[in-house]
Amino acid sequence: MKKVTMKDVPISKAEMTGGLMTGTQVWRQPILDTGDSSNFNFAIVKFDAGSRNKFHKHSGDQILIVTEGTGKVVNDNESLTVTEGDIVLIPAQENHWHGAPDSTAMAHITITVAGSNTEQTEA
């Protein structure tokens, strides 16, 4: 058993204009470190207004739980506007992006299958 107190978990804040991220700043707060669970990864990701990730795929399913703000989750066929309390399931290998590309910030919890790989699908 492991107890995590959110205020005690360090937040990684970095300019993420390269790699998988676009825009200005994205914060990542890993709640469970690698090795804490053999089944899943769990973190909180906060996007400044105008920031999002690029199209990508995961080798395992991903669950997003929006905890604040308004953002978007987009795949090859549809664009969803998401707000606090919305939950989105992204199946393995679905090409998608998520974040806060407009004028409001957004944060979500991300849960992925342990060992899942992420592949960027656009430059």
Image (cartoon, helix red, strand yellow):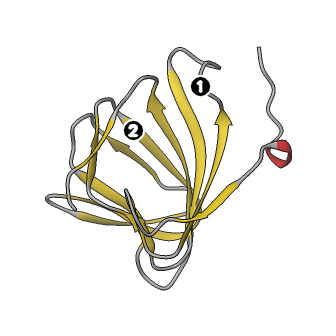
Q: Residue at x 42, y 23 (%)?
A: 115
Picture quarter with the C terminus: bottom left
Which mark is nearer the camera, 2 or 1? 1
Quarter-wise, where is residue 33 in the image?
top right
Residue named by callout 1: 34
Quarter of the image for residue 53 reads bottom left
Q: Name above or below for residue 51 compared with residue 78.
A: below
Q: Which residue is mark 2?
A: 62
The alpha-carbon separation of the residues under discs 2 and 1 comes to 16 Å
Relative image position of residue 13 (x, y in whole percent): 65, 61
Task: Please tell me which residue lies in front, 61 or 23.
Answer: 23
Dot 2: element: strand
Q: Is 24 displayed left or right of 101 in the figure?
A: right
The x and y percentages for residue 69 are 57, 70
User: Considering only vertical position in the picture, is 20 above or below 62?
Assistant: below
- Which quadrant does the N terminus fall into? top right
- 116 above or below 20? above
Q: Position of residue 66 (x, y in %)?
A: 54, 56
Other-residue count near label 1 (Cα within 10 Å), few / some / many at <14 / 14–19 / ≥20? few
Three-letter amino acid code at disc 1? Thr
